[in-house]
Image (spheres, helix red, strand yellow):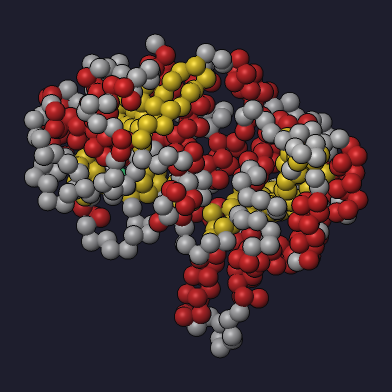
Amino acid sequence: MKTNYIFVTGGVVSSLGKGIISASIGKLLQARGYKVTIQKFDPYINIDPGTLNPYEHGECYVTEDGFETDLDLGHYERFTGIHTTRNNSITTGRIYKTVIDRERHGDYLGKTIQVVPHITDEIKRRMLREDEQGEDWDFVITEVGGTIGDIESAPFMEAIRQLRWQLGRSAVCVHLTYVPYLKAADELKTKPTQHSVKELQGMGIQPDILVLRTERHLDDSMRMKVASFCNVDLECVVQSEDMPSIYEVPVNMQHQGLDAAIMRKIGIPVGETPAMKAWRDFLEKQRNATHEVHIGLVGKYDLQDAYKSIRESLNLASIYNDVKAKLHFVNSEEITKENVAEKLEGLQGIVVCPGFGQRGIEGKIIAAEYTRTHDIPTFGICLGMQMMVIEFARNVLGYKDANSAEMNPDTPHNVIDIMEEQKSITQMGGTMRLGAYECELREGSRVYEAYSEKELISERHRHRYEFNNQYKEEYEKAGMKCVGINPKANLVEIVEIPEKKWYIGTQFHPEYSSTVLNPHPLFMSFIKACIN
Ligand code: GLN
């Protein structure tokens, strides 16, 4: 089959869940046996979101090949299980950089470089994945960030317009809009959708399929109205009502006929509706998991999206343990020795969250001390692991001034130190230790057991600082074991205190590789410990 291209745009307002819809389309097409990839094009100028504050853009997701990306790639991976790469997350900044680098190289032979055609051509090249022709995908799904009408997304729209013309039926445009319910009038309103489609049409793009996000059920007359005003077939006007969980969306979209509509547009026989048994079994488990497990997220970003993958990993692992995760954000900036007991009261386990910089770290250290001494299951991730290590140095090894070189470069007991290869780095963007690295597990350790006695694992990283091996022996002797080691660089990747119920810190980010059908073994094991 030749590759087909699905473009997903959004209108009316942002935060409609375009990422979830794109991921759901990917899942549904996969269920039909197709080979799919999903990519995100973001209109901002940053080369990647790696340098962005989480308050700006939520979590920064990391691919196996070490690229810092938009958090929607996390949805893509969790829904479909595919491994995305640096080619799946593109920004305006990257497009311009490629073009400008080429211009400096003299590749344009004296031509004036312009948005059309040079920028749009580079966008098209990326949308078509021309660097990877060997990959033979049946479907490439491209989600465009932002909302129709944004000045900065105009070149992306122009690229889509050209591609539709060029590709004919192999290109399908899915436009996601919002149908608000007006309480005072007791009515659902389609006008914003009509305007949004007009805007698209004004850019030369006729959407093939409309997905209408709504809080209330839309009856057929409503859909008919939208169909006739927007030049879209009735069967291609699909409604996406609010669901109790994002994981219900693929099945609901299948029920509403979204995948079938896409296939008809392209001209592929629709055939039987896939059963999606494993997915449905998961949903069944989710619906049945009513008993709650209370987990604290000790971090500094009071924002749902900042710890997206951690939250989802906890949710998924809980469902597979037949419980429902109730996640409580605990602001580490507000934790003191005096109030820590009260702040963590009622929690069955805590995650000490990743992060950068000084703000909120003392609270993380206090929390780690409290849960260690009270034997409450504790999962430290990246900076969280580093804080567990510092806490142990201060309160068990007796190095009161122990710290990370990140927080105090002159600290006498730098139990967390800057990595050798990081010392000469001056450029901030994309220069951390990023992506998947191998890790050897110590036989008999808690993590070895959690990973079903695997000796060698591979996990994704995003950090500049590391456990200082000069202190390794002291830690081992005092009871904090270095049970995961990178075999090439000899870096400590996992620490655990075996005598505790569950006290484990990982320098890597296991949350990036937890998926709906394959919840991460460490999160599974952690939740198990929390409910015991
Ligand atoms: N700031 C720490 C480092 O760079 C931890 C990073 C993180 O938590 N992702 O090593």
The relative height of residue 284 versus residue 307 in the rendered view (above or below) is above
Residue drawn at (66%, 76%) of the image: 116
Residue drawn at (39%, 38%) of the image: 509
Q: Position of residue 371 (x, y in %)?
A: 27, 22
* Residue 255 in sight here: yes
Residue occupying the far front of the picture:
184
Q: Which quadrant contains ligand 1?
A: top left
Residue occupying the far bottom of the picture:
110
Residue drawn at (28%, 32%) of the image: 335
Q: Position of residue 454 (x, y in %)?
A: 37, 26
Q: Nearer the viewer, residue 305 or 272?
A: 305
Residue 321 left/right relative to 406 = right
Picture quadrant where residue 500 is located: top left
* Residue 36 in sight here: no
Residue occupying the far top of the picture:
532
Q: Nearer the viewer, residue 11 or 107?
A: 11
The quarter of the image holding the C terminus is top left
Picture quadrant where residue 445 is located: top left
Q: Nearer the viewer, residue 528 or 343?
A: 343
Q: Position of residue 479 (x, y in %)?
A: 17, 22
Q: Position of residue 39 (x, y in %)?
A: 59, 51
Residue drawn at (23%, 61%) of the image: 424
Residue 283 left/right relative to 467 = right
- The count of marks equals 0
The relative height of residue 495 versus residue 377 in the rendered view (above or below) is below
Picture quadrant where residue 218 is located: top right
The relative height of residue 135 versus residue 325 in the rendered view (above or below) is below
